[in-house]
Amino acid sequence: MDLNVIWDFFIDHLRKEDGIDDAYVKSRAGIPFIYIRSTKDKKEIEYSIKIWSAKAMRGKRLHSDTIFFREDHSLYVYRHRFYVPQEKMFCCGNLCVDCVRLKQ
């Protein structure tokens, strides 16, 4: 799975959202930050991020995490990442309650 395709879909659709003038990603120390210039308020921007990240992840085994970082007039910065959930992939024999053998 190529995360670049997911990031491109996510950012392209955020840019097309009404009220969002520009959106782009910059990585600092390996951590991706979303920069959004918008006339919307913080709550509406976070809702748009949630909706478009969910649509970008649809059909894939991914999760997303978004944390507000800072705001400067109409520029909002969020730390956002897509990640693969950590799950057990095999039975260890310890009779765990979340054993992969018990999943259907």
Image (spheres, rainbow, N blue to C red):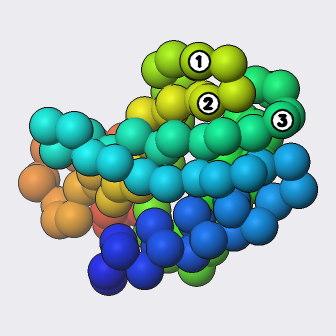
Report x, y in % for residue 84: 33, 59
Report x, y in % for residue 76: 60, 29
Image quarter for residue 41? top right
| Residue beneath the point at 14% across and 37% down | 29
Q: Is residue 15 above or below residue 99?
A: below
Q: Local crowd at mark 3 within 10 Å, few (<14), some, or many (≥20)?
A: some
Q: Which amino acid type is shown beneath numbered disc 1? A: Asp
The reply to whether discs 2 and 1 touch (Cβ–Cβ < 8 Å) is: yes
Residue 93 as seen in the image, left or right of residue 19: left
Q: Which amino acid type is shown beneath numbered disc 3? A: Thr
Q: Local crowd at mark 2 within 10 Å, few (<14), some, or many (≥20)?
A: some
Report x, y in % for residue 77: 51, 30
Report x, y in % for residue 68: 54, 23
Q: Is residue 54 visible?
A: no
| Residue beneath the point at 61% across and 42% down | 36
Residue ID for mark 1: 72
Q: Secondary structure at mark 1?
A: strand
Residue ID for mark 2: 75
Q: Nearer the viewer, residue 23 or 63?
A: 23
| Residue beneath the point at 76% across and 25% down | 42
